[in-house]
Amino acid sequence: MPDVWATVAELGSSMQERLASVLETRGADPQQQAMRRVFLSDIKFPTGAHVLEVGCGTGVLTRVLAGWPNVKAVVGIDPAASLIREAQGLASNLANVTFQEADGRTLPFGDDAFDVVVFDSTLSHVPGPERALAEAHRVLRPGGLLAVLDGDYATATVAFGDHDPLQTCVAAMMANSVNDRWLMRRLPSLIRASGFEEADFRSHGYAETGGGAYMQSVIDRGADILHASGAIGEATAAALKSEARRRVGAGTFFGHIAYASLTTRKPTRATI
């Protein structure tokens, strides 16, 4: 199945609204917030930094960047006009933030335009991430920083053992929602091939025990995908969702996704 995020600009309004809600729900999660703070703390923002966030969605990270030390201005881009409108509304009180509808593989900016380029849970959804990395390299000033945070989505699980039926929902959702579930494992070599310096790599973990809105939404979306594909009937989809809620109510729910982040630098021009 195609990655729904890769074609988000082509989806109907109801699906785009649902995805916007997912982004804000995940952005409000305390573990996700803590992970993003660690990620941003690894970036050595120069004083007065001009920052580009590629694939900003509803602007969850963009809004944090706007108030981060040393950041002067932030531009968020996304190919989905509806998400850009949502982002603009949510950041209407932030004077140093602008949003623009654009594709990260064909950035509408000149060379050497930014001090920092950030991808947050974006590159794994991009068909041809090499093009996005090449564009990031182009718009970064010499010595500028690239920072990437994304899921190692092949690790996503809610299973207690082999053949856990809820894991089928997770597998369906990831196959339908992530273009490359293994991207973070390949990214260090892609970074080098794109002309960046050797990257600093960090692993993160996201876990929900007893209950949690995000992983439960993963199960719900996976059950809906399986139903829409004809793999299961409506009653089975409802039963899978009900089982997730039973585990939450019993305090036995478990979900986990490994994440990773890296920071690297565009080499400075050689002096003559």
Image (cartoon, grey):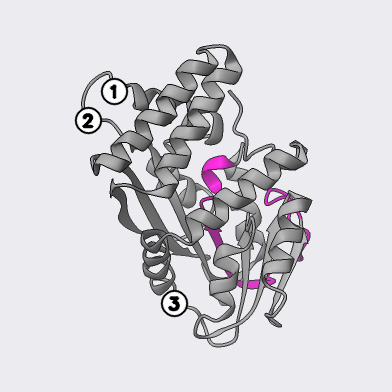
Q: Residue at x 61, y 27 (%)?
A: 2
- Residue 119 image offset from top left, x and y in percent: 54, 57
User: Badges 3 and 2: C-beta atoms under 8 Å apart?
Assistant: no
User: Badges 2 and 1: C-beta atoms under 8 Å apart?
Assistant: yes
Q: Is residue 137 left or right of residue 222?
A: right
The label shown at residue 164 is: 1
- Which image quarter is the C terminus in? bottom right
In the picture of the structure, the residue carrying the numbered disc 2 is 160
Could you tell which of marks 3 and 1 lies nearer the N-terminus?
Answer: 3
Local secondary structure at mark 3: loop
- Residue 49 image offset from top left, x and y in percent: 59, 81
- The number of callouts visible is 3
Cα distance in 3D space between marks 2 and 1: 7 Å
Q: Amino acid at mark 1?
A: Asp
The answer to whether one can see residue 12 in this image is yes
Instruction: Report the magenta residues as a range.
Output: 102-125
Q: Is residue 236 magenta?
A: no
Q: Quadrant of residue 252?
A: top left
Q: Amino acid at mark 2?
A: Phe
Q: Amino acid at mark 3?
A: Lys
The label shown at residue 44 is: 3
Q: Residue at x 55, y 81 (%)?
A: 67
- Residue 130 image offset from top left, x and y in percent: 58, 44
- Residue 98 image offset from top left, x and y in percent: 73, 71
Q: Residues within 10 Å of mark 1 (few under 14, many from 20)?
A: few
Q: Is residue 253 left or right of residue 192?
A: left
